[in-house]
Image (cartoon, grey):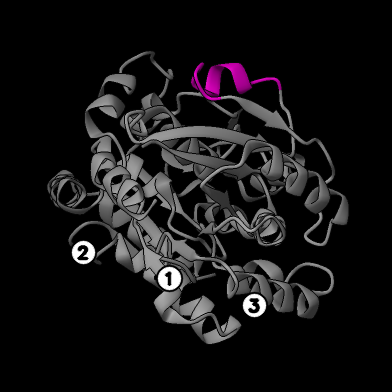
Amino acid sequence: MKKKILFVAYSICGGGSERRLASILRELDREKFEPHLCVFSLTGGEKDALPADVPLHPLPAALRPASLSLIWQLYRLILGLKPDKVFSVLWGVNVIAAAAAKLAGVPAVLNEATTPSESVKRLPLPFLRKKMISFFYRRAERIITVSEFAKADLVNVFGVPAEKITTIHNGVRVAEIGIAAREYDPGATGFVLGCGGLNWWKNYSLAIKALAGGAGPALIILGKGPLKERLQKEAAEAGVELSLPGHKENPYPYFRQAAVLILTSRYEGFPNVLLEAMACGTPVISVDCPGGIREIIEDGVTGLLVPQDDPVALYAAIKRVTGSAAFSGWLAAGARARLKERFLFKRMLASYERLL
């Protein structure tokens, strides 16, 4: 008998977590599952992102972790749909979904794709947010974290029992990414690439400082966000050739043509962008920030790790990769082998289906 699963997310359009959820909804075995999707925000891109056979249940509202209105609306939706399980994504949605599911008497599976202690401490009322995560996560049937680092964070900071938590690493479709990487010509090659929202926690200022004075290759950052003008100003003052093409639905041609992809974040969950670059044969460099970075990168084998907020070390790593085709190829080959061994989409999907 099919299990009806109500997936809950803030949006189905956006970053890595949203793309991962859309992929799961597309590929989930329809012989075993009947998926539904509830979102708290509509962007207009739902038709393209969502499979036609997945009913969409929008509950548009400003997302607040303690939103009683959203909890009530979702509770009523659960009562009407009568799903076997509720599956939600990201902590701000998870606390709402866990509360509504508990009221409705339906098991909740919460998917944590960030490092929540790093995420909440920079928001208003961090103590209250921590209490909410701790309270509601402990009442879920199961929690899925995308990294062992995130699992340890929930156990050590929020007091969530370890036995409630399962880690399922993200996975990518290597062959499909390879095809998409050849769909168009980005018009540039040999550049340093960043990819993600132009916001504070992605810390792209570090990349600009590393390449200051025009000593390195051009820098391209894919994404949109509130810091666009500030980054342009910083690059101009530092003498860095910076291009900001905006958000790309298919960023992979840029990945393929880049000399190296860098991740400069202040914290992460389990960054898909590293896996996607590896699938394109592009060497990767990441700061050693809180998150599942070390579960992806083995330093010197599948990529390079550098200390946080150290532009000198980042520049040295960039020069090491771009200055040696042999070393660049070594990292790319090592990354691709690790990708096929541990981080394939079909492996990730099978783990989700077993748990559900």
The outermost residue toward the front is 1
Which residue is at 21% across, 57% downward?
A: 302
Query: Residue 64: where, in percent of width, then height?
Result: 81, 55
Q: Secondary structure at mark 2?
A: loop
Residue 30, quarter of picture: top left
The outermost residue toward the right is 69
Query: Residue 220: where, in percent of width, then height?
Result: 51, 36
Residue on which disc 2 sits: 300
**CA gap, disc 1 to disc 2?**
31 Å
**CA gap, disc 3 to disc 2?**
37 Å
Q: Is residue 226 located in the magenta-colored stretch of the structure?
A: no
Query: Residue 316: where, in percent of width, then height?
Result: 36, 62
**CA gap, disc 1 to disc 3?**
13 Å
Q: Which residues are magenta?
A: 44-54
Q: Give the amino acid type for the residue marked by disc 3 in the picture.
A: Ser
Q: Secondary structure at mark 1?
A: strand
Callout 1: 10 Å neighbours few (<14), some, many (20+)?
A: many
User: Is tag 1's residue or tag 2's residue first in the polypeptide sequence?
Assistant: 1
Q: Give the amino acid type for the residue marked by disc 2 in the picture.
A: Gly
Which residue is at 63% across, 50% downward?
A: 238
User: Is residue 79 visible in this depiction of the protein?
Assistant: yes
User: Is residue 218 visible in this depiction of the protein?
Assistant: no
Query: Residue 203: where, in percent of width, then height?
Result: 60, 57
Which residue is at 36% across, 37% downward?
A: 1
Residue on which disc 3 sits: 134
